[in-house]
Image (tube, rainbow, N blue to C red):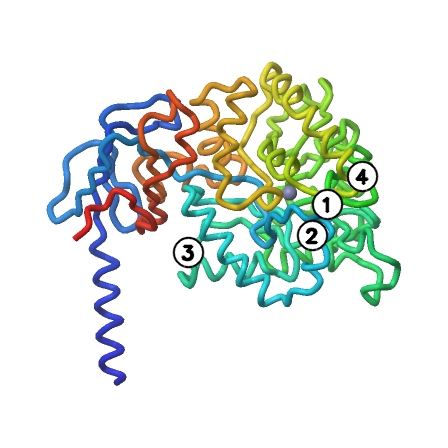
Amino acid sequence: MKTLALLFAVANVVLAQSNTYVLKAARLFDSASGQVVAPGMLVVSNGVIQSVGGSAPQGATVLDLGDATLLPGFIDAHTHLSDEFNPDYNGDALLSLQRSIPEKAIRATANARKTVMAGFTTVRDVGSDHFIDVGLRNAINAGYVPGPRMLVSVHALGSTGGHCDDGDGFRYGLFGHETGPEEGVINSPDEARYAVRFNVKYGADVIKTCASGGVLSPTDEIDVPQLTQAELNALVDEAHTLHRKTAAHSHGAESSKRAILAGIDSIEHGTFLDDEDMRMMHDRGTFLVPTLTTRVGLAESKFPPLVRAKADRAVKQQDIMVKRALALGVKIALGTDAAVFPHGDNALEFAFMVADGMTPAQSLMAGTTSAAELLGLQDKVGALKPGMLADVVAVPGNPIENIKLMQSVIFVMKDGVILRNDRAVPR
Ligand SMILES: [Zn+2]
């Protein structure tokens, strides 16, 4: 038995090593220049892009996808794979208390699968409970379940009663103790430092904070600052000291100003950013992650009156804000807030960005090179060039002519492994 198992193991290794592919399609999107080149051809070997164009190496598997465009694997800088969309707000709150943690983790694997099959081969997952994000990331990396490459944040860090306080909206004492730093709730610069260290100790790749109120939190106002300048300074300083980038959920102008001054790497949502915020972001290179697709879930949901009023106010302002940010030259990376709408629909964001004034090429760059830069992964993903990880996606036709084609992915390769090929010839 042992010998047989060993033989199988050896055979698998040999198979995994002889994985040289030539990927052909009518077009290829060069995310560095924003240009579509024709025809498209890539050589991939051992999980890495060997060449763009050139000749096919001997023994390579040639896949011709025909009238399609090859693109770098898409990147979503704002997901919540541990949660899922439920239009019934109160029903979802009850379910999340009833479901066991293992059940939540198993459901998260389905969310990861939907995300990668939609072409998103890398995500930055910005807020989770019970370390489900860490477990999911590790299981994907070990090959147990298909999913995107994940940068995870453990708990998002915010104040008592704020957007990231999971006890918010429930009666005092219900969970046995008041939420604290180990659940992501901080109330001083020292607690901010402790919570960052705690998150990093237990697996965080990135630190997420809630600098303002939010749409879905039941008791707060959407744009009020929820952390002091000193708390944000300590949080960002500690994260950067530990070589972790930072992201701030921030709808308000003042909350964003504090986060930008603290040195935050990205403002998430940014709904009520003012011109001063945007100029500071432009000057410092702070990214904006607009999460426009949230409107899909917000429109369909049954909310209590306070949440409904916040949702409507935010959605009305989003497009105005993004147009202004584009005019002032703020760097924008694609992020969706998936879980506020169904996982797998992330590519809707491209069309929403174009509707707000981006060119199709700019939106593709926001979801590839720009997002890679924000995540600090620009040497690994976000472009089709030699030496990069072989994350390759194909969509039918030409997405520069019709951005909605980004929602019709036909081919996904991650790390040189084909996860999806709708144009495979049946044998
Ligand atoms: Zn979010």
Q: Which residue is mark 3?
A: 146
Helix, strand or loop for disc 2: helix
For the residues labelled 1 and 3, the Cα–Cα distance comes to 33 Å
Where the N terminus falls, by quadrant? bottom left
Helix, strand or loop for disc 4: helix
Q: Which residue is mark 1?
A: 235
Q: Are marks 2 and 1 in contact (CB under 8 Å)?
A: yes
User: Which residue is at 76% across, 30% downward?
Assistant: 252
Q: Are marks 1 and 3 in contact (CB under 8 Å)?
A: no
N-term mark: 2 or 4: 2
Q: Which residue is mark 2?
A: 196
For the residues labelled 1 and 4, the Cα–Cα distance comes to 33 Å
Residue 219 place in picture, x, y as percent: 83, 44
For the residues labelled 2 and 4, the Cα–Cα distance comes to 34 Å
Q: Is residue 157 above or below residue 171?
A: above
Q: Which residue is mark 4?
A: 305
Position of 56 with respect to 209 (left or right) is left
N-term mark: 1 or 3: 3
Q: Amino acid at mark 2?
A: Val
Question: In the rendering, which numbered label is found on residue 99?
Answer: none
Answer with the quarter of the image where residue 259 lies. Answer: top right
For the residues labelled 4 and 3, the Cα–Cα distance comes to 39 Å
User: Which residue is at 63% across, 49% downward?
Assistant: 86
Q: Is residue 36 above or below residue 423?
A: above
User: Which residue is at 24% across, 33% downward?
Assistant: 25
Q: Is mark 4 within 8 Å of ligand 1?
A: no
For the residues labelled 3 and 2, the Cα–Cα distance comes to 29 Å
Mark 3 neighbour density, 10 Å: few (under 14) some (14–19) many (20 or more): many
Q: Are marks 1 and 4 in contact (CB under 8 Å)?
A: no
